[in-house]
Amino acid sequence: MSMEIIGHWLDLMNIDGWIPREQLLGEEARNKVPQEFVLQHTNNANPPTLFLPIQDYLSTFSGDAVSNFKSEDRAFLEASFPRLQAWYNWFNSTQVGKLPGSYFWHGRDANTDRELNPMTLSSGLDDYPRASHPSNDERHLDLRCWIALASKSMAVISALLGKDTSKYDSMVKELTDVDLLNKLHYDAGSGRYYDFGNHTEKVKLAWRVWQDPMSGHIRRELVRSVDGRPRPRLVPHFGYISLFPLIMKIIPANSTVLRKHLDMIADEKLLWTGYGLRSLAMTSSMYMKYNKEHDAPYWRGSVWININYLVLAALHHYSQEPGPYQNVALQIYQQLREGLIRNMVESYYDSGYLWEQYDNAANGRGKGAHPFTGWSSLILLAMAEAY
């Protein structure tokens, strides 16, 4: 069934290699989506999450298990490869940054004065704080890590099909080069990975009062006020995006950078709660801040199960990987998994629902859309320790 679903998504590809992020099938579905989100732009990428199940599928043929690679598997990959290749090439021709090994999400509004931090809807982490002033000079850490995952998968598929792997091997080498990653995204002072862009922390929402020239009525609106000149710099907001090098297992198991990340994950002043990892550190200037007058914080503190699941998978990996921090990774893994499961089960019994997200402070209560058995159902895989 998974192979069939992946195939249908790949069949949605347009002539350029772009795949839409979602399908709104029918009038009822369209009516439930705000109008500004219905139109999808073919120059904007979205996270290539299809490579996650593809990677899991490919893992069944790794090492001595290559004998499991049957004729039906070859047929599926042969049919999928041209589309995956076109999709991969589209990413690497449209989403690349100005420096080698850099990428950035398109679609941010550089001209808006209505948002505290211009949204990055294409990333899937809508209001997670990025550079205050969008530009083509941005370097988005999460997208770089997604392309690293895609490159690994394409290299494995090429090898299984007897095709030339050199292009993908080269990309894997570049995108898993920790020295290059650190040069583009690492802040040695804090030990954290960040986005890069034209940024100032001196922004706020303030009321602007004006007189409507047509009616003469006094009106007011909440607009962004910028009190400091932006400059090219790392964007100092620690949260889910900072964890992507760990999530994609790019950080070496023997690296002190890994130890720092394990410590930061377990720090209650940063991401740790008894209900899962919050999406943005409490120390961030954007923590739980409204983006517009009526836009409540979304990826600015709440606990999201999809990213927590990916972090669990990474911690499980590092707990098995030979290195000096195996036991630390295992301990954090066990505590995080236990907290997630306990909170979701208790919330389900209290409310009768699985929720889109969970509060990072108010007893871990469910919030947002419900019932929500999309990515929140990943808790079942966490229970089964299926990564």
Image (cartoon, rainbow, N blue to C red):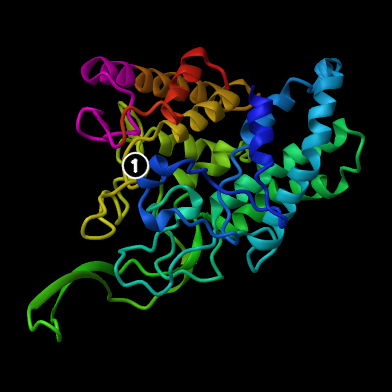
| Relative image position of residue 168 (x, y in whole percent) | 80, 46
| Any part of residue 258 in sight | yes
The correct choice, above or below, for 83 with respect to 371 in the image is below
Quadrant that contains the N terminus:
top right
| Relative image position of residue 125 (x, y in whole percent) | 44, 48
Judge from the rendering whether residue 83 lies leftward or rightward of residue 339; answer left or right.
right
Give the residue at the far front of this rendering.
Answer: 27
Category of crowding for the residue at label 1, using alpha-carbon neighbours closer than 10 angstroms: few (below 14), some (14–19), many (at least 20): many
Judge from the rendering whether residue 275 lies leftward or rightward of residue 174; answer left or right.
left
What amino acid type is highlighted by mark number 1?
Leu
SS under mark 1: loop
Q: What is the quadrant of residue 102 in the picture?
A: bottom right
Magenta residues (range): 342-368
| Any part of residue 252 in sight | no
| Relative image position of residue 41 (x, y in whole percent) | 54, 60
The correct choice, above or below, for 22 with respect to 342 in the image is below
Residue closest to the eye, 230 or 345: 345
User: Residue 170 lies in magenta, yes or no?
Assistant: no
Q: What is the quadrant of residue 218 in the picture?
A: bottom left
Give the residue at the far left of this rendering.
Answer: 217
Task: Give me the residue at 26% from left, 28% from top.
Answer: 364
Q: Which residue is mark 1?
A: 270
Residue closest to the eye, 360 or 31: 31
| Relative image position of residue 24 (x, y in whole percent) | 48, 43
Quadrant that contains the C terminus:
top right
User: Residue 359 lies in magenta, yes or no?
Assistant: yes
Task: Give me the residue at 48% from left, 57% from top.
Answer: 39
Residue closest to the eye, 60 or 4: 4
Task: Give me the residue at 46% from left, 33% from top.
Answer: 306
